[in-house]
Amino acid sequence: MTSAVTARAPAKVNVHLAVGPLRADGFHELRTVYLAVSLFDTVTARPSDGLSLTVSGEGTGPGAGADVVPLDSRNLVWRAAELLARHAGVPADAALDVVKTIPAAAGLAGGSADAAATLVALDALWGTRARREDLAGLAAELGSDVPFSLHGGVALGSGRGEQLSPVLARRRWDWVLGIAGEGLSTPAVYAELDRLRADGKVPDGETLAPAEPVIAALRSGPPQALAAALLNDLQAPALALRPALRRALRAVSDAGAAAALVSGSGPTVAALADDERGALRLAAAVAGAGVFRTVRAVHGPVPGARLVT
Ligand code: C5P
């Protein structure tokens, strides 16, 4: 019998995030380009009677607050386990240990990564042999970003973000992530966008910005072309809710980033570097500015949720 199985899944940055109006189902229509980056959470699954969950690592220590990462059925990991068990017709028996390096509520899809890694780990532990497209369907039930956490690489996302088509990126892209001490709630950022639109302070989103420029830039570079094509409609509402982000973005530009934007619903700032050396230099300069809790140099694309051997 298998004793322990570990899977890992990456964080993501949205290099293009065009948000349409609020739909009747409470979600917004998206046209987004996801890039999986080299910051990973791991999930280890062991045989057990019933389901149990521990979470350690980034943002889970004393003072982080249990609400940040709940340890019960509110956790996406827990829900992923129950969903796969139901799908496969097996009991949801597993002891799950999540080790986080992706901070929660940071706009990096950390919770989605945990859910995707759980699906992959439990599929192996339970021997359910789910097809990749079945796992993708379960992932979409769990959250808009979970299919991408499973898929990894680069992909164009439509619908609420869960419908993916792969995008080719021939080169490696280096980034610096500036991570704030306190997270932002994704629904709150979307709701703030709706408010800004109702007040006429930002465009209404009826026309979604095309993704072609960013896809073309991702394929072939140079970094200046990608820098010019980056877009995030959630940046304005994230800035409205967290005015200090403006200073953070400025600090990153002052440190020499080719471009910087808020990642997803924020508050993480993603800064584009020319190459790996540039990213390490930029990370040191950004850390020196003292506006972030953590600064990480990462690169993408990297694969989606995979077993760790
Ligand atoms: O799908 P997920 O659970 O990650 O979404 C969390 C929340 O983010 C949703 O309840 C919704 O408020 C908002 N959201 C949205 N439009 C999307 C994705 C998420 O409004 N396309």
Image (spheres, rainbow, N blue to C red):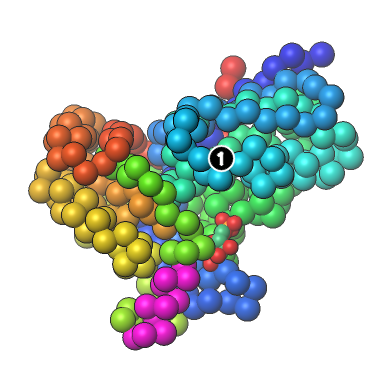
The kind of residue on which mark 1 rests is Ala
Q: Nearer the viewer, residue 158 or 266?
A: 266
Residue 191 lies in the magenta stretch: yes
Estimate how packed mark 1 is, as few (under 14), some (14 to 19) or many (20 or more) residues with alpha carbons within 10 Å: few
Label 1 residue SS:
loop
Horizontal side of 231 relative to 113 (left or right) equals left
What secondary structure characterizes most of the magenta part?
A: helix
In which of the image's four quarters is ligand 1 placed?
bottom right
Question: Where, by quadrant of the figure, is residue 277 drawn?
Answer: top left
Residue 69: % across, % down:
56, 41
Q: Which residue, given by chain and number where applicable, does mark 1 sit on?
A: 66
Residue 308, above or below 234 = above
State left or right for residue 70 relative to residue 14.
right
Measured as percent of width and height from the top left, residue 253 is found at: 14, 50
> In the image, which residues are magenta?
190-200
Q: What residue is shown at x 30% (from left), y 49% (from top)?
A: 269
